[in-house]
Image (cartoon, rainbow, N blue to C red):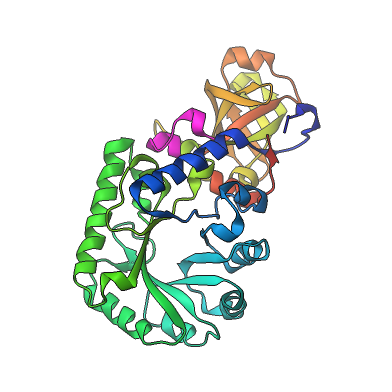
Amino acid sequence: MSLNWNTITGPQVLVDSRKSKRNIKRMQEKAESAGVDLRPHFKTHQSVTIGKWFGKPAETAIAVSSATMARTFADAGWNDILMAIPLNPRALPAYNRLAREVQLGLTIENADSLKTIARLLSPVDVYVEIDAGYGRTGISWREHESINLILEQARKMPQVRSLGLLLHAGNSYTMRGEHGIAQIHQESLQRLAELIENLSIPRSELRVSVGDTPTCSRMESFPGADEIRPGNYVFYDWQQQRIGACDWPDVALAVACPVIGIYPERNEVVVHGGAVHFSKDSVTIDGKQIFGQVMHQTTNGWGSPIQGAQLVGVSQEHGKVRVPEGMLKELELGDLLIIVPAHSCLVMAAFNGECTVI
């Protein structure tokens, strides 16, 4: 749709549908070329409208990060849903309803989780999360015996339809450039392969799900995987551009923020757009936290970055933007700044998936 800048009165998420659909198509083509299935992680956009850009709901396997999110997409027609977050026993009623209605996958990372699996009233797919170096959740890839025991126990349960291993190499987010991304990619998949070699469960009985946006964006093959599970690639963001997972023309999300204060003495303006809109995720430049990059405004979106114009501070509703002197002289109260955030997933979460599609 065309964009009427005059209708924007407060912080508003803008999604460039042309760029986003191009990102989606590229990843679909990559998965097909690599011989793996694609299960996009819908936590990034949290939008039924955008979700349909990936294909027909009934034909699109997805990952989500909460029972509430799973419910939203199940109600909208998606029927193959993986909860790519460790099982929460308190969500058992939600799991039971979902398992009755869709092909549900649940992720576990310890044997205690099998107590909750045993209380399910319908069968589910169970994935054991493996930590290959990220250090967030999952069982260490070195714990061959413990992982094998959990899989063997789950294998005997009537509530378990199939078994899988799940890996998220989130440490790729700390890399810079294709070489660094490749290093994490190779290391994590080699560790996963070593684990699988030491399991008693036949490889043919395990579905291996891997994926993070940097490795899925820059790598061409995924040896040992049955599916890839990236999410952020639908929009990308400043972090991904800094990592080297994408280029500026790939970034499909920005936030339009009105200028509400002008401070020539410090080369700054203040916009209505703070931590509740951008979160406090940042990139680090010269040792300083920066929360967003200001872009050149175009007739129906945005273009390249404006050098020296960055969101340098956020409080709840306020955003401090440092701008070049020439730009500062031209700005007036009420003007809009178009800012690419450090992390698009948290922006969409802050806006509950609401956005203006252009």
Q: Nearer the viewer, residue 68 or 24?
A: 24
Residue 81 within the magenta-colored segment of the rendering:
no
Which residue in the rendered view is the most extreme toward the right?
7
Identify the residue shown where x is 40% and y is 51%. 212
Quarter in which the C terminus is drawn? top right
- The picture places residue 336, in percent across and down from the top left corner, at 70, 27
81 relative to 284 in the view: left or right: right
Q: Dividing the picture into quarters, in which one does residue 156 lie?
A: bottom left
Identify the residue shown where x is 59% and y is 49%. 45
Identify the residue shown where x is 59% and y is 60%. 58
The answer to whether 80 is drawn above or below residue 337 in the figure is below
Quarter in which the N terminus is drawn? top right
Q: Nearer the viewer, residue 98 or 274?
A: 98
Q: Dividing the picture into quarters, in which one does residue 217 lie?
A: top left
Judge whether residue 311 can be spotted in this image.
yes
The answer to whether 222 is drawn above or below residue 274 in the figure is below
Residue interval drawn in magenta? 240-251
The answer to whether 20 is drawn above or below residue 332 in the figure is below
- The picture places residue 286, in percent across and down from the top left corner, at 39, 30
Identify the residue shown where x is 66% and y is 53%. 48
Residue 243 within the magenta-colored segment of the rendering:
yes
- The picture places residue 267, in percent across and down from the top left corner, at 59, 21
286 relative to 318 in the view: left or right: left
- The picture places residue 186, in percent across and down from the top left corner, at 24, 50
Q: Nearer the viewer, residue 45 or 54?
A: 54
Judge whether residue 352 can be spotted in this image.
no
Total marks in image: 0
